[in-house]
Image (cartoon, rainbow, N blue to C red):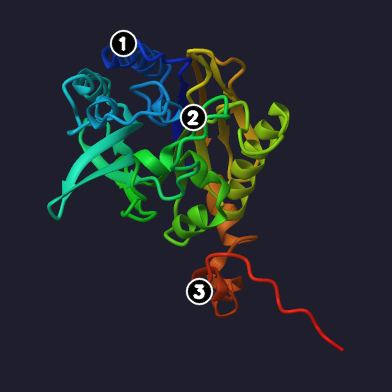
Amino acid sequence: MSRHLKVAAAQLGPIHLADSKASAVKRMMAMLREAAASGCKFVVFPELALTTFFPRWWMTDQAEIDRFFEAQMPSPETLPLFELAREKKVGFYLGYAELTEEEGKVRRFNTSILAGPDGRIVGKYRKVHLPGHVDHIPTAPFQHLEKRYFDVGNLGFNVWRMFDEDVVMGQCICNDRRWPETFRVMGLQGVEMVALGYNTPTDNIYFQEPPYRRVFHHLLSVQANAYQNGTWIIATAKAGKEDGFGMYGASVIVAPTGEIAAQAMSEDDELIMFDADLSMGESIRQNVFNFAKHRRPEHYKLITERVGAEPPPPTRK
């Protein structure tokens, strides 16, 4: 029996250092209205959707850094988005920088939330696979300081029931999409749709890699993980040149078959939509990737026992 959910990826163009959070929210609200008018019930916004991608900047003043973070959600700037979503009865995913206190210690996370069509937060995720570096690299054209500004996420890869508990929804952020463990953990919880926001630089500051290959690897990761877990993936970028520093778009809605159902054509604010048939995932999960029937976890122990690769010792004659 077909089960459908019309969804949208709300790609954002550049957000510059001088741009306010309120202006970013205003842009998101315009896209949410457009999505609702087209019958969409779920909208995915990007990673760190309220600000520029600030980890590209070296900063030492903690107060300067913390201005990019939210101490509560909804925050005063984002409350209008939540109110509009409730009015339009549209759920959404939103990525932002979270400032919180846990066990008497201040913590900072690269975070995303799922909000239901009633405007209430259903689930929260904190980015696990933080890319980049900690120290300043003066020779680099820009920095990638997620390991400096964020703590490693501590909530795991959970799933939640949304839309009258009819859809099993997961979420992750940016670099998480490159790691198959991200999706397999959610797949083992019966995930049917994964919301994914990202901000990915066009240039790789660590080794030579042409921009076309970076987009190829993005699509390869999303399409392969969708197929291997029988899940829809809505991957939404923040794109374009922020203060001269490029990030690619390529926002996509990917079916459980691994096929691209819709793809953005620009690096600006752009809404792409698709009426997702959730029964397509059921077919994949019951046949090719029937975990209960085919998985052999007794042979996968190294996945959790070992972090880095260790080749076997050489054979000596």
Whether residues under marks 3 and 1 lie with C-beta atoms below 8 angstroms apart, the answer is no
Residue at mark 3: 305
Looking at the rendered structure, the kind of residue marked 2 is Asn
Provide the secondary structure element on which disc 1 rests. Answer: helix
User: In terms of sequence position, does the residue under pointer 2 or pointer 3 come before the other?
Assistant: 2
Looking at the rendered structure, the kind of residue marked 3 is Glu
Q: CA distance from mark 2 to mark 1?
A: 18 Å
Q: Give the foreground label among 3 and 1.
A: 3
Q: Quadrant of residue 80?
A: top left
Left/right of residue 258 with respect to residue 112 in the rendered view: right
Q: CA distance from mark 2 to mark 3?
A: 31 Å
Left/right of residue 112 with respect to residue 191 in the rendered view: left
Looking at the rendered structure, the kind of residue marked 1 is Ser
Is residue 84 depicted above or below 45 in this figure? above
Marking on residue 199: 2
Whether residues under marks 2 and 3 lie with C-beta atoms below 8 angstroms apart, the answer is no
Q: Residues within 10 Å of mark 1 (few under 14, many from 20)?
A: some
User: In terms of sequence position, does the residue under pointer 3 or pointer 1 come before the other?
Assistant: 1
Image location (x, y in percent) of residue 180: 56, 54
